[in-house]
Image: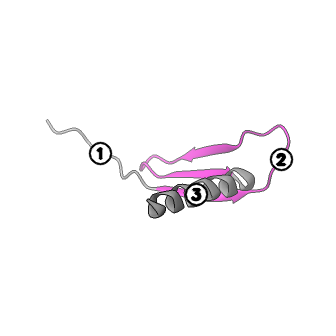
């Protein structure tokens, strides 16, 4: 009997920085869709890190 598969869709929403709240939170739906709310500061840092990694890769 084949195993059922979920869709695996993930959507990101940016949220403002708030003291005392976790940096991201997930909302999961029965169809497998996930909405991940991400702190703006963490999102910017991740973009910066990705840009650095890409630049280093292209410079080689």
Q: CA distance from mark 1 to mark 2?
A: 36 Å
Counting the numbered discs, the total is 3
Q: Which residue is mark 1?
A: 5
Along the viewing direction, whichever of 38 and 8 lies nearer the viewer: 38
**Residue at 42 percent of width and 48 percent of height:** 32
Q: Nearer the viewer, mark 3 or mark 1?
A: 3
- Earlier sequence position, callout 3 versus callout 2: 2
Q: Are marks 1 and 2 in contact (CB under 8 Å)?
A: no
Where is 59 relative to 25, above or below?
A: below
User: Crowding near pointer 3: few (<14 within 10 Å), some, many (20+)?
Assistant: few
Q: Which mark is residue 52?
A: 3
Magenta residues span 10-38
Q: Residue at x 50, y 60 (%)?
A: 54
Q: Nearer the viewer, residue 46 or 33?
A: 46
Where the C terminus falls, by quadrant?
bottom left
**Residue 18: mark:** 2
Q: Residue at x 71, y 43 (%)?
A: 23
Residue 32 numbered tag: none
């Amino acid at each position: 009997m084949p195993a059922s598969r979920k869709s695996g869709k993930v959507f990101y929403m940016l949220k403002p920085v708030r003291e005392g709240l976790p940096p991201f939170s997930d909302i999961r739906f029965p169809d497998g869709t996930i909405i991940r709310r991400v702190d703006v500061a963490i999102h910017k840092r991740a973009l910066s890190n990705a840009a650095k990694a890409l630049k280093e890769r292209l410079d080689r």
